[in-house]
Image: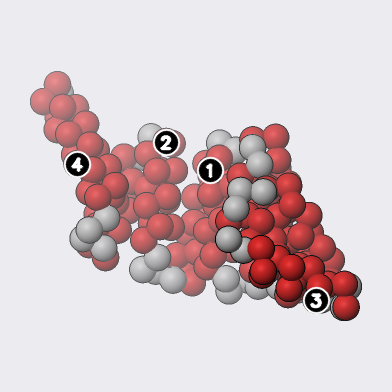
Amino acid sequence: MFAEAIAAYEKAIELKPDYALAYYNLGYIHQDEGRVEEAIDCFRKASDHDPNDADTWINLGNALRSAGPNRLADAVDAYKKAVEVDPKSVMAFYNLGSGYQDQGRLDDAIKTFQSALIIDPDYVDALFNLGIAYQDRGDLDLALSCYERAEQLEPEFQEAAQAAAAIREIQKNKAAQA
């Protein structure tokens, strides 16, 4: 499907071996087609040639994360680099928070999602994942407020509505037992 685009980017790299954008786009295609290791290689090369592009670091992190749990620490490192090069990137903070969450580092995830929400207070995915982190930590009231805010911002967000309803049910059952 992407054969012509792949050939064009490979030709561009042949002509200009330090062309970061060609590596980036080639990595994106490989990632989209499920060729994770090739994507990782391309994103690494793109970051070598343009180390100040947060999107490259984010996509490298995403590719590493999709390669499996044994690559999660490397993914988190890539997300940290994205935050370092663009401290105003909501996506860098969001992905770093998700990486921490995958590692079970809930306090780090919470702080990082909060940083994403400072940049964009209406970013529902960060709100939802912040709610999950709070819930996993046992802070049901904080989790509920995140889910309700996400649902308020995006009424069609079924996962947020379901999570909020589940917490309300838990709280109702606890109150009935008291």
Mark in front: 2 vs 3: 3
Q: Tell me which numbered mark, 2 or 3, is placed earlier along the sequence.
A: 3
Q: Tell me which numbered mark, 1 or 2, is placed earlier along the sequence.
A: 1
| Left or right: 71, with 154 as reference point | right
Give the alpha-carbon distance from disc 1 to disc 3, as whole Å: 38 Å
Q: Position of residue 56 (x, y in %)?
A: 69, 66
| Left or right: 168, with 121 as reference point | left
- State the residue position of label 3: 12
* Residue shown at the point (60%, 53%) measured from the top left: 33
Q: Amino acid at mark 3?
A: Ala
Q: Amino acid at mark 2?
A: Asp
The coloring applied to the image is secondary structure
* Residue shown at the point (36%, 61%) measured from the top left: 124
- State the residue position of label 4: 165
Mark in front: 2 vs 4: 4
- State the residue position of label 1: 101
| Left or right: 135, with 151 as reference point | right
Q: Amino acid at mark 4?
A: Ala
Tag 1 and tag 4, C-beta contact below 8 Å: no
